[in-house]
Amino acid sequence: VDKTRKQSVAAMISKLGRLGTLDPEDVAAIEGLPWRERTARGGSYLIRQGMPVSECSLLVSGFSARSKITDTGRRQIVSFQIPGDMLDLQHLVLGYSDHSVEVITDAVLLWVDADALREVAFQRPGVGQALWRDAFVDASISREWLLNVGQRPGRARIAHLLCEFAYRCVKAELASSELFELPLTQEQIADATGMTAIHVNRMISTLRVAGVISSRKRRVEIRDWAQIQVIAGFNPDYLHDQLTS
Amino acid sequence: VDKTRKQSVAAMISKLGRLGTLDPEDVAAIEGLPWRERTARGGSYLIRQGMPVSECSLLVSGFSARSKITDTGRRQIVSFQIPGDMLDLQHLVLGYSDHSVEVITDAVLLWVDADALREVAFQRPGVGQALWRDAFVDASISREWLLNVGQRPGRARIAHLLCEFAYRCVKAELASSELFELPLTQEQIADATGMTAIHVNRMISTLRVAGVISSRKRRVEIRDWAQIQVIAGFNPDYLHDQLTS
DNA sequence: CGACAACTTGACGGGCGTCAACCGGAGTGG
DNA sequence: CCACTCCGGTTGACGCCCGTCAAGTTGTCG
């Protein structure tokens, strides 16, 4: 068990390293934190909207989603996380969660006390900057989703979601760009794009008959990457994956 | 001129102070930064989507908006800023802007080099935490907007926008809760809520005939605060304005 | 092989987009 | 002082995208 924990920490450090430049002491400081490993079943909730939280966590394997609900019970998924993403970095400084975090596949996580992580973030600017960057990229993705949901027609919203998911998975070396695992039900896609599951189904059908994608079960294949980007209006600049800052 | 600059810095420090606890040395460090004051005419752009940016700025007076456009030319306003808000804190660590920043009324701003501010943010945890908090509240607002645009019907979206704007202005001591200045055209409200200006007009009319609000020109009066909150499904928790963390 | 969740397809209606016209106030120039 | 202009707001007609309701199919897991 301790061995997988070390592998997990290593995976995390590799992700943080891509977000900035970590020197050996930065790495040692991160490794020295009291990380705790935890597994979660797909469908379970890690955090509930409105609950106090004093820990931060990192997704090692599996996928998760943040969501919010209105007083009338309608749900909006506001982001997805893939392996290597921080789930709730905001709890470094905010004590209550404004959203829920749900694990959508079986997953492995690393938890650490927010105070301890904050300590390192301030003592070691290399670590702090990597965390800042992760948080700001996350915020940038939220803005793009707002644009997606607010301004694009249904088919384009779904295409955009697929493009982003594929792009991020490829960047994280989880998939090839043409064929990847999309661990989402059509209802979850609907909640993420502000549509109904039924309409999602219709729009996916049109993408399929147009030969842009093919999907069996939860395995999506992008058959025409150029065209789906056009349909989606997808431009990956908002993901800030160049370190050219 | 230097006098107004000092007042501006003082206003900013008061805002940051509300975000955390600043000791006298924190305040001195902020005051010691090479702030530059700048005025901007309503309607002008401070930052264009895709441009490199290496400065951060704070809105001293006036209002501004962040916006993004799709490849088809549709615009989404992703947030508003009121006096005391940071406009582009993300440029502490991200070198390119993923959105535009537009001043929507005549405004006064304070600019500072991102490198210098980042330096202070790391050397003085009190300052750093206040900035972290500002950034995370900003992200939380984005998520609430996503919920708003994705899941609520048109009338509720507008009501929610009004509630948030009023609440934030009151919190910043810019207005009383019943009567406040809303410096937005209906077209801007439309761009912020993912609707058309025409439909915004219709929905505002229904709020007016229901006696919930009254508005002449750009001055909005909330006549029934309890009811507009119900219509909007507004719950201010997401603004994280309690320091109870 | 039964049960349940997810997916699929069809019919119907409504919220909201689009197009078009008109109004009203603020600024401008003669 | 009054036309002219322009921007923003207002109102109406019409239609489409997408939500809703309903039924049926597929796939998976016990």
Image (cartoon, coloured by chain):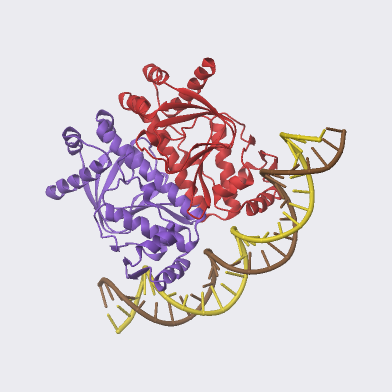
Chain colours: A purple, B red, C yellow, D brown
Numbered circles on residues, count? 0
Q: Quadrant of the N terminus of chain B?
A: top right
Residue A239 in sight here: yes
Q: Quadrant of residue A89?
A: top left
User: Where's residue D14, x and y in %?
Assistant: 68, 68
Residue at far top of view: B3
* Residue drawn at (63%, 35%) of the image: B181
Residue nearer the viewer, B147 or B33: B33
Q: Quadrant of the C terminus of chain B?
A: top left
User: Where's residue D22, x and y in %?
Assistant: 52, 77
Residue nearer the viewer, B173 or B94: B94
Q: Quadrant of residue B34?
A: top left
* Residue drawn at (60%, 53%) of the image: B196
User: Where's residue D7, x and y in %?
Assistant: 66, 43
Residue at far left of view: A3
Residue A53 in sight here: no
* Residue drawn at (35%, 39%) of the image: A91
Question: With D14 as the anchor, is B52 left or right in this view?
Answer: left
* Residue drawn at (32%, 70%) of the image: A217
Q: Is residue A4 above or below residue A229?
A: above
User: Where's residue B51, x and y in %?
Assistant: 42, 40
Q: Is residue B132 above or below residue A163?
A: above
Q: Is residue A138 above or below residue A207?
A: above
Residue nearer the viewer, D6 or A171: D6
Question: With A44 as the anchor, is B102 left or right in this view?
Answer: right
